[in-house]
C-alpha cells in the first residue's frame, strides 16, 4: 500500500510550542549525548551542560538507571523481579501472597488503572498469549492454544495490595509483560534524575518513548513520527517543549505470515491477535509512563474509541495514522491541512 503524502508539521491549540528527536544545533562542547542498547531498544540521551565532567556524569546516571530498570523488569532475564513475579504469583494465594518491591507495586497499580480506564484495551496480562509469539522466527500460537489462554488475559486477576506491597494471580497461566509501560517509566525516571542535577535542557528517548526538559536552547525540540510503511522516513514533525511523546506502531516488531498478513506485537487482549485498523498511534502528555500506556491503548481501541479516550483526558493529545494512510488528530491539535 502506498502511503499518501503526510503533513510535515502540526501545531497545538493549547500552547505555542516552538519517535526520533530531529535536528541539531551547530556542534558545541556544551551538548553531551550517549546512546546504548537497553530494554530491547536504543536509548538516546542528550543534554546541555556547561561542565563537561558533570554533563558526562549526568548521562552515566541516566544509563545506569535504565540498566537497573531493565534488570528488574525485563521478562527475558530469569533473575529479574518480573520473572520472579510470573513464576511465583500464580502459586501465591490471598492467604499467602507474594511480597514485591514498592516499585513493582507502583507499575502494576498504574497498569491496572489503565486497564480500568480503557475497558481492558490496555492489559499487561496480554503476555499470557503474547509470550508465545516470536517475531524474529515468525512463530505464533495455533488457534486452539491461543483461545485456551484468553481467560488468563485479565488485569483484574492481578490481586494487588498497595499498602503491603503484595500480589497474587487469580489464574495459573497469567503472565505479566510490562512492555507497554516500563520504557515510559524508565524515561520518566531518567528525566527525574536529570532535573535533580539541575539540567534545564535535555531529551531522553527509549524506542518510541521520549520526554523532554525545557527547549532546545531557544527553539523547540523537533520530534519526528516515523512513516509506518517506510520507517526510515519521517512522516510528521512535532515541535515540543517540556513534554512526553510516545508512538506505538505495527512496524516495530512483526512478521508476515503465509497468508500475507502482518503479525505484529501490539495484541488485542480480547482476541490475543494483532490489533487492526491503526498502524501508528502517538500520544503527547506530561509523563512518558502515561503516554506509553495510552499510545498502546489508542492503537488497540481503534480510531473512534481511541480518539474519544484521549479527548476525555485534559492533559493529552493524539495523532493517529490508520491503515488507509490517513492522519487523524485529537481535539486539541490543529490539522495543518485545515
Image (cartoon, grey):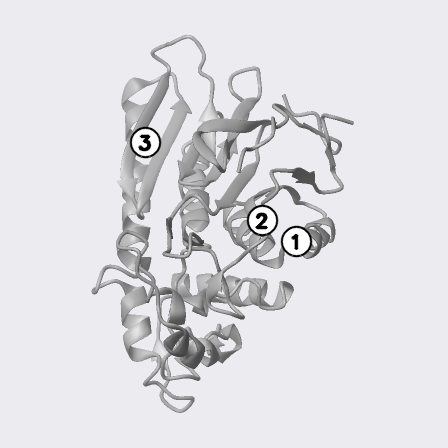
Q: Label 2 belongs to which residue?
A: 278
Q: Label 3 belongs to which residue?
A: 59
Indicate the quadrant where residue 36 lies.
top left
Residue closest to the far right: 338
Q: Position of residue 152 (x, y in %)?
A: 44, 78
Residue in view at x 62 percent, y 63 percent: 118
Ranked by sequence position, the earlier of labels 1 and 2 is 2
Q: Position of residue 93 (x, y in %)?
A: 38, 88
Question: Pointer 1 and pointer 2: residues touching (CB < 8 Å)?
Answer: yes
Q: Is residue 162 left or right of residue 101?
A: right
Say which element carries label 2: strand
Ranked by sequence position, the earlier of labels 2 and 3 is 3
Q: Label 1 belongs to which residue?
A: 306
Local crowd size for mark 2, using a 10 Å CA cut-off: few (<14), some (14–19), many (≥20): many
Relative vertical location of residue 76 with respect to residue 42 in this rendering, above or below: below
Q: CA distance from mark 2 to mark 3?
A: 35 Å
Which of these two is toward me, 46 or 141?
A: 141
Q: Position of residue 323 (x, y in %)?
A: 58, 45
Residue closest to the far left: 79
Q: Is residue 76 visible?
A: yes
Which of these two is toward me, 76 or 260?
A: 260
**Dividing the image into 4 quarters, which one contains the C terminus?**
top right
Ranked by sequence position, the earlier of labels 1 and 3 is 3
Say which element carries label 1: helix
Amino acid at each position: 500500500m502506498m502511503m499518501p503524502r503526510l503533513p510535515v508539521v502540526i501545531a497545538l491549540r493549547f500552547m505555542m510550542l516552538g519517535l526520533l528527536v530531529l535536528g541539531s544545533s551547530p556542534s558545541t562542547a556544551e551538548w553531551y549525548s550517549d546512546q546504548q542498547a537497553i530494554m530491547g531498544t536504543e536509548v538516546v540521551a542528550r543534554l546541555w551542560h556547561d561542565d563537561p565532567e558533570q554533563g558526562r556524569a549526568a548521562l552515566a546516571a541516566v544509563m545506569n538507571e535504565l540498566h537497573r530498570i531493565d534488570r528488574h523488569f525485563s521478562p527475558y532475564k530469569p533473575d529479574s523481579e518480573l520473572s520472579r513475579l510470573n513464576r511465583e504469583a500464580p502459586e501465591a494465594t490471598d492467604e499467602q501472597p507474594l511480597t514485591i518491591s514498592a516499585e513493582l507495586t507502583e507499575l502494576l497499580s498504574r497498569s491496572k488503572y489503565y486497564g480500568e480506564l480503557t475497558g481492558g484495551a490496555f492489559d499487561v496480562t496480554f503476555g499470557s498469549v503474547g509470550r508465545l509469539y516470536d517475531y524474529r522466527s515468525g512463530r505464533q500460537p495455533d488457534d486452539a492454544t491461543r483461545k485456551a489462554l484468553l481467560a488468563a488475559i485479565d488485569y483484574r486477576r492481578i490481586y494487588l495490595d498497595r499498602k503491603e506491597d503484595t500480589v497474587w494471580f487469580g489464574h495459573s497461566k497469567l503472565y505479566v509483560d510490562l512492555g507497554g509501560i516500563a520504557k515510559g517509566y524508565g524515561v520518566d525516571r531518567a528525566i527525574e534524575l536529570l532535573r535533580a542535577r539541575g539540567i534545564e535542557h535535555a531529551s531522553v528517548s527509549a524506542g518510541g518513548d521520549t520526554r523532554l526538559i525545557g527547549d532546545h536552547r531557544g527553539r523547540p525540540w523537533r520530534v519526528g513520527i516515523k512513516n509506518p510503511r517506510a520507517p526510515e522516513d519521517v512522516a510528521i514533525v512535532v515541535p515540543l517543549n517540556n513534554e512526553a511523546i510516545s508512538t506505538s506502531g505495527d512496524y516495530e516488531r512483526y512478521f508476515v505470515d503465509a497468508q500475507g498478513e502482518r503479525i505484529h506485537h501490539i495484541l488485542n487482549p480480547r482476541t490475543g491477535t494483532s490489533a487492526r485498523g491503526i498502524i501508528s498511534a502517538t500520544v503527547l502528555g506530561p509523563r512518558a509512563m502515561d503516554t506509553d500506556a495510552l499510545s498502546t491503548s489508542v492503537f488497540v481501541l481503534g480510531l473512534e474509541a481511541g480518539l474519544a479516550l484521549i479527548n476525555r483526558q485534559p492533559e493529552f493529545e493524539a495523532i493517529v495514522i490508520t491503515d488507509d494512510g490517513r492522519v487523524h488528530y485529537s481535539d486539541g491539535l490543529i490539522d495543518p491541512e485545515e
